[in-house]
Image (tube, rainbow, N blue to C red):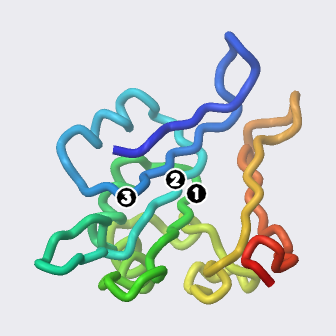
Amino acid sequence: MGSMLEFGPPHRPARLRLYVSGDTLPYEGLAEIATRFPAADLAVLHLGGTRLPGGFVVTMDGAQGAELARQLAPEKILPVHYGDYTVMRSPLSAFLAEAERAGLGPGAAVSGPTGSSRAAGWLDHVHWSVRPPPEGTEADGRLHVERVPDSGARRGR
């Protein structure tokens, strides 16, 4: 199911739309998100193909995540949660390959410091700052996503 978060001044158009999938699986109702909110700036997709004992799947795998990203057509995609536990069976590389097959383009996934979305290690355990542009700026480059230096405090170091 997920959540669409809109940020901006009250009673004015949203300046930033952020979709967070949460632990969800594809179903017909997900297509309604793109209909109701056609311009998401960032989609945070919880992936991993988590398979619990007995074969119960609770998170999208790479192919399912790429299909949802294709439907939502966000400006940027931030894949998360794909390697947090041993029950996860679908690595980030599966999502990136499927995203490429779906024609999402190399610039769709939030990229690492080298500019390559395949810099998977850099995406692990970092904190991100996502904010709209300053008031009055052009829509080009509307979304600002950057890595926030990790002091280690949030991870108990």
Of labels 1 and 2, earlier in sequence is: 2
Q: Are marks 3 and 2 in contact (CB under 8 Å)?
A: no
Q: Position of residue 80 (x, y in %)?
A: 51, 69
- Residue closest to the far front: 156
Q: Residues within 10 Å of mark 3 (few under 14, many from 20)?
A: some
Location of mark 2 (residue): 43
Name the front one of labels 1 and 3: 3
Q: Nearer the viewer, residue 79 or 37?
A: 79
Residue at image point 52% right, 57% down: 44
Location of mark 1 (residue): 76
Residue at image point 76% right, 20% down: 9
Q: Is residue 45 left or right of residue 146?
A: left
Whole-angstrom CA distance, mark 3 to mark 2, is 13 Å
Q: Position of residue 40 (x, y in %)?
A: 53, 41
Residue at image point 39% right, 27% down: 36
Residue at image point 37% right, 75% down: 48
Name the front one of labels 3 and 2: 3
Whole-angstrom CA distance, mark 1 to mark 2, is 6 Å
Of labels 1 and 3, earlier in sequence is: 3
Q: Are marks 1 and 2 in contact (CB under 8 Å)?
A: yes
Q: Amino acid at mark 1?
A: Lys
Whole-angstrom CA distance, mark 1 to mark 3, is 19 Å
Q: Are marks 1 and 3 in contact (CB under 8 Å)?
A: no
Q: Position of residue 73 (x, y in %)?
A: 44, 49
Relative to 145, does residue 41 appear above or below in the rendering? above
Q: Residues within 10 Å of mark 2 (few under 14, many from 20)?
A: many
Picture disc at residue 23: 3
Of labels 3 and 2, earlier in sequence is: 3
Element on which disc 1 rests:
strand
Image quadrant containing the C terminus: bottom right
